[in-house]
Image (cartoon, rainbow, N blue to C red):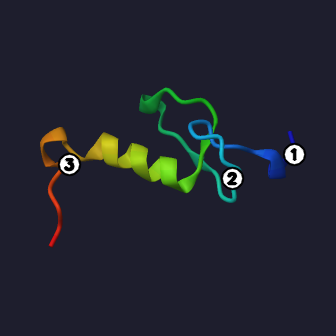
């Protein structure tokens, strides 16, 4: 597969920069920035603090 044809393993968008998923996520392939950021938030922010808005 050509480097220009890489797609996000979660959303399928074309990758301009590829992020490698953490092994705990059980995702094979690379992620786009949006999906990587979303997975990081899910992994590191505790469930009881996810709805808190920073002011």
Crowding at dot 3, Cα within 10 Å, few <14 / some 14-19 / many 20+, comes out as few
Most foreground residue, 48 or 24: 48
Q: Secondary structure at mark 1?
A: loop
Please name the residue that numbered disc 1 is placed on: 2
Q: Sequence order check: which comes first, mark 2 or mark 1?
A: 1
Q: CA distance from mark 3 to mark 1?
A: 38 Å
- Check the picture and name the quadrant holding the N terminus: top right
Query: Is residue 23 found left or right of 9 in the rendered image?
Result: left
| Circle on res. 45 | none
Residue at 47% x, 38% y is: 22
Decide: is 25 above or below 12: above
**Contact check, label 3 and label 2, Cβ < 8 Å:** no
Q: Secondary structure at mark 2?
A: loop
Please name the residue that numbered disc 2 is placed on: 15
Q: Secondary structure at mark 3?
A: loop
Please name the residue that numbered disc 3 is placed on: 50
Q: Sequence order check: which comes first, mark 3 or mark 2?
A: 2
């Amino acid at each position: 597969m050509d480097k220009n044809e890489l797609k996000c393993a979660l959303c399928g968008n074309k990758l301009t920069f590829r992020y490698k998923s953490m092994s705990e996520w059980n995702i094979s392939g690379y992620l786009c920035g949006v999906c990587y950021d979303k997975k990081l938030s899910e992994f590191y922010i505790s469930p009881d603090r996810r709805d808190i808005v920073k002011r």
